[in-house]
Image: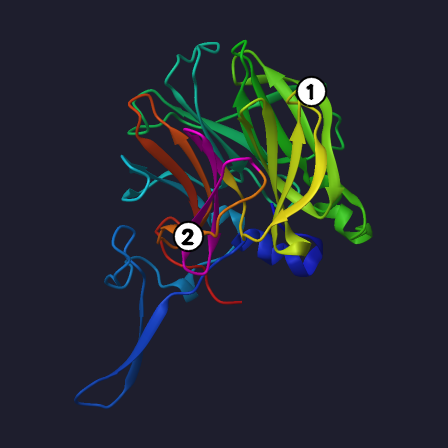
Amino acid sequence: MRNLFLPLTLLLLLGAGCFSLESETTADSDTGEQTQVVTEPSSVTGEPTEPPTGEPPDQQESGIQNHALFIAFSDDGDTWDVNEETIAEEASVGNLMALTQDAGEYEAGDLLAYFVDASEMAKIGEERIGLISSTDNGKTWSERQKIVINDLPDTILTVDPTAVQLDDGSIRIFFFDFSQVGGVAQEDWDEDQDHVILSAISTDGETFDFEGESFRRVNVTDPEVVKFGDMWFMYLAAMAEDGIAIATSVDGQSFEDTGIVINMEGIPGSLVVDDEVQIFGCSRTGITRASSTDGTTFSEEEIALQVPACDPDPAILADGSIALLFKGFSTTLTMPPAQ
């Protein structure tokens, strides 16, 4: 979650890199009264569509409990079929993983989506990590459940999950300790204090054993971890630099800062395609993408999908197609209200 301190908490709840929709003013032919009509870009063609249905943005609340997870599918990574039905509500900052091996009761090819679960949250500081799964390439999804992390210190608040499956089939989950900046910690928050990314490991994807610290750096949140070649890469939202920071690891658990920050907005998602790694973010025009052949030097970002959403995370499905999980600001794909 990219937020920090009280003035930035609203930014966190809205999500990083929100973008605005185009609007035009029309006048009633009889009364002369002017009305502003907001149009959103089509998720496939980029052309304006009809105004979104449901409550208008200025009547929606903006908190994390109003966030929802959506999913889109593509055969080529360029043209997307967006499912406008939510797959999880009161949910934010999702991470999508396609299993390559069996894990517990899950089979190779199943999809696991970890996310910040706000369904039982009464105030900031009560978020937890939730999990839903799919056995049919993302067409239908299970009921949510909370993951369990054994031996997790009581002071740690787990948010912003990213999970990877290791060669032995176990699942390692990384997360940001939000207790540093959330809840009562905001009263004494130090902007120069390192933010800590932690990890836990599991054989079934549901019950994890706490491992400890994986990475620390000032002003980073929302880790995304991927193995590319022989190296592990961690991409993080670097709010102060308005970019995405990069850390690397040989063992996949302990990461070191490269000092590199990509000029790209949003909470990162990643995908390895052939001999390149792609990073997904979001901007004022939609979900963006950039690619790299070395994991650190990236192309100029391009628009991957025009949809009013953020926090994208892709995965390659068993049939070779791509699924893209992302966060909407309400249960319909409309923009959040202006602050």
Residue type at tag 2: Glu
Residue located beneath label 1 in the image: 210
Q: Mark 2 or 1, which is nearer the eye?
A: 2
- Residue sitting at 25 percent across and 61 percent down? 47
Residue 179 vertical position relative to residue 11 in the rendered view, above or below: above
Q: Pick whichever, 198 or 276, lies toward us.
A: 276
Residue located beneath label 2 in the image: 302
Task: Please tell me how crowded label 2 is: few (under 14), some (14-19), or many (20+) other residues with Cα within 10 Å.
Answer: some
Q: Which residues are magenta?
A: 270-295
| Most distant residue in the left direction | 30
**The quadrant where residue 314 appears:** top left
- On the question of residue 197 being in view, the answer is yes
- Residue sitting at 45 percent across and 59 percent down? 336
**The quadrant where residue 180 appears:** top right
Residue type at tag 1: Phe
Q: Is residue 102 left or right of residue 165?
A: left
Residue 232: where, in percent of width, then height? Answer: 60, 27
